[in-house]
Image: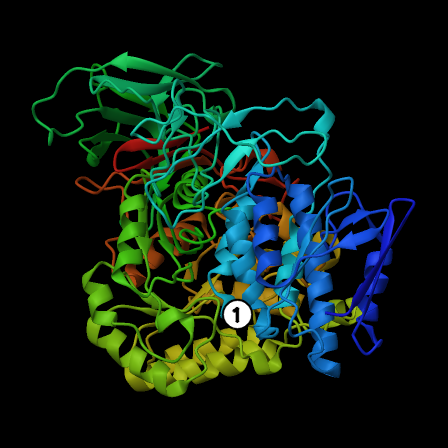
Amino acid sequence: MGKVKVVSKNNQVSVKVKSTKDEQLNQNMAELLSNTAVEGFLPFHIVSDNNGFTAEYGTAGYETAKEFFKNRVIDQHTFSVFMKSSVNALSGMSAYNMEYGNVMVSLDTVLIESATGKALYLYYPATGYNNGEFYNVFLDEILRMIRTPMNSDVSFMVRLKELLKQPENMTWNILGEYADSIDVPAVNRESMQPQVHVVQTQQPETVQFTHQAPPVMYTAPVQMQTDIQNTGCVSGGDDKICPVCGMRSTTPDAVFCIGCGSRLESAMQFSVKNEQTEIKKRCNKCGFSNNSDALFCSECGTKLEDIGVLESTEIQDNDDNNAKDTSVIIIKGGRVVDPVSKTDEIMDIIIKNNIIEETGYNLNVMEGAEVINAEGLIVAPGLMDTHVHFRDPGFTYKEDIITGAAAAAKGGFTSVVCMANTKPAVDNIETLEYIQKKGETTGIHVLQTASVTKELKGVELVDMEALANAGAVGFTDDGIPIMNEHVLVEAMKKAAELDLPISLHEEDPEFIIRPGVNQGKVAEQLEYGGASATAEDVMVARDCILALHTGASVCIQHISSGNSVEIVRTAKKLGADVHAEATPHHFTLTEDAVLKYGTNARMNPPLRTEEDRIKIIEGIKDGTIDMIVTDHAPHSDEEKARPLENAPSGITGLETSLALGIKSLVEPGHISLMKLMELMSKNPAEFYRMIPGSITKGAAADLVIFGEKELWTVRKEDFASKASNSPFIGWELPGKIHYTISSGKIVYQR
């Protein structure tokens, strides 16, 4: 290793590194460090005194670096500083070495510790840069050792853990974007009291974190004495067990699992549990006792995670585990709008044993029945959204199946179809069954597609038949276009053989300079580049002809281009089994929304021109577009706070979809309310080979009750979803939802 000179002045540090040939090495890194404050972490760990400094490198330095992180208290701000500075230094050093030769190939780790205890590590392998894979290994080990302050949201660590699972895809830019996305204000350590909790898990692959409030200075590792029971629970306390990964939470008031990010408020369990005890959530507002997994009070509609109180009640033995729920709901005087039976009239509905037992006029109210007064309200079949992203597994800090289903219920949806671009992708039966089983706990019908190609790479087909037999309702690589025509034709033929639909994301990257914004006047104003409508048009034209050739049932997903609408219209006339879906944001907004709403109006495909928007509405009116879907795409606030070019595309849409359909389509007179229900319930179900919901005797009791003209305001704090990345926040919309009933049970009540 060459010589290192360290100078400290006014809490600033500059570093100059020279090789043995006295050549200055990595001027970029020196300039970076000269402007870096000592507070937090620096890209070197220095041990210095009046006589100079000592540094460890090679294997010894690497092990010493890891030892320093062991049991250290590191908050999110400190971790973001660590990531930013080390990524900048490493990427700069690697760039220099590649340009001028690997003059530092022997340097594995530089470890420097200052007298104040501020520290960070630079790890560089003898094998060279290798696209950052060495750094992935180092970070992975750090994540297993460090502590975070009490009650911290550790989803930023979970996110990094997910990134590290695919080192072959890692770049310094990706790590840099991650570091920027998690940056938060520094923690005030002076006001925090030390507390200790321990997490144990029987799953060795799960990230394990222990939590302790940070001291004023970074301290030596703490050896804790704890009484760990065989159950893995901290002795003497109540905790929550994640229903997904089995990890116990660190605090009784934890909301999300630190292992996998799943929501925990429905998973409260005590270290000693009486099998005859049922846990309830009592609403502090009205006193009603709700089920333990309820998100909203069934009596008054108040959000329970904020004010709910857990209580236990004794329950009676039931020898008949298969006994039907005999609860009865009577809906009185609502206007029934049913596109299946073509009913549009005021009537009563009796629900019993999860089905519609009777419809008619002035039906008798049974003793003990729950009565819903629907006078002045619309009663319609439960909505079905066939294009949602619940981010589970893999990205549960954005959304999970439980919170996604809660958002769906609040939006009037009783059935959803999830896309397959999770992590891992739904290209295998194990992942498919995980989603199916978790979906069964939600109260609504959560259906799952499988991917068309393995790992969404567009190269090799999945075992479509096996996945279909396991319950996949269709196939899609949504989010990624399938560019290989041979692969796509084989997939279409197999889907036709299985009589299942195949849905396609239509964006040719050849015609995209930057995604998320239309290549037009707004992109020019922002000097952004954008995505041309041609990117969609050429793919739609190709796939409509392939659908005609193969006989496959094909869906053109989230159509955005007026030309593409015309192409689908022509393909239908030619006899192709082609369908198209449109989203509320594409028929409500235009590219100008990007100027007003920023990243919350960035999406793939992008919002386009007013002419495109009008042509989409024309396609809806004449049946060219036969489904309205949300493309519900939740993202974290941190991600959407990035600059436009770095933010992810997509918006959360389940809770505003019906309202926007009424505002943008029904109220202007483009379509009737009956037609809207057809687009949001009947047609999506039929495309996915389901029996569409209907308000007729003997039908499944899946219903939505809403006030068509009743106004409500979209508020960020009211979202049931984990995410609130919506351009419609602050909008006053019609169509306030009062009840959502799924399988005869009220799953949402305002």
- Above or below residue 373? Residue 176 is below
Give the percent coordinates (x, y) of residue 329: 26, 26
Mark 1: few/some/many CA within 10 Å (<14, 14-19, 20+): few
Q: Is residue 384 visible?
A: yes
Say which residue appears at 24% left-offset and 65% top-offset: 467
* Left or right: 357 in relation to 658: left
Give the percent coordinates (x, y) of residue 680: 40, 52
Tag 1: residue type? Asn
- Above or below residue 302? Residue 49 is below
* Left or right: 750 in relation to 124: left
Choose top left, top right, bottom left or bottom right for residue 463. bottom left
Say which residue appears at 82% left-offset and 61% top-offset: 32
- Above or below residue 545? Residue 657 is above
- Above or below residue 691? Residue 515 is below
Depth check: 260 or 683 in front?
260
Q: Residue furthest right?
A: 10
Give the percent coordinates (x, y) of residue 637: 62, 46
Residue at label 1? 169
* Left or right: 401 in relation to 126: left
Give the percent coordinates (x, y) of residue 83: 66, 54
Depth check: 254 or 380 in front?
254
Q: The N terminus appears in which quarter of the rendering?
A: bottom right
Depth check: 49 or 558 in front?
49
Way the structure is coloured: rainbow
Say which residue appears at 60% left-offset and 51% top-offset: 64
Q: What kind of element bears circle 1? A: helix
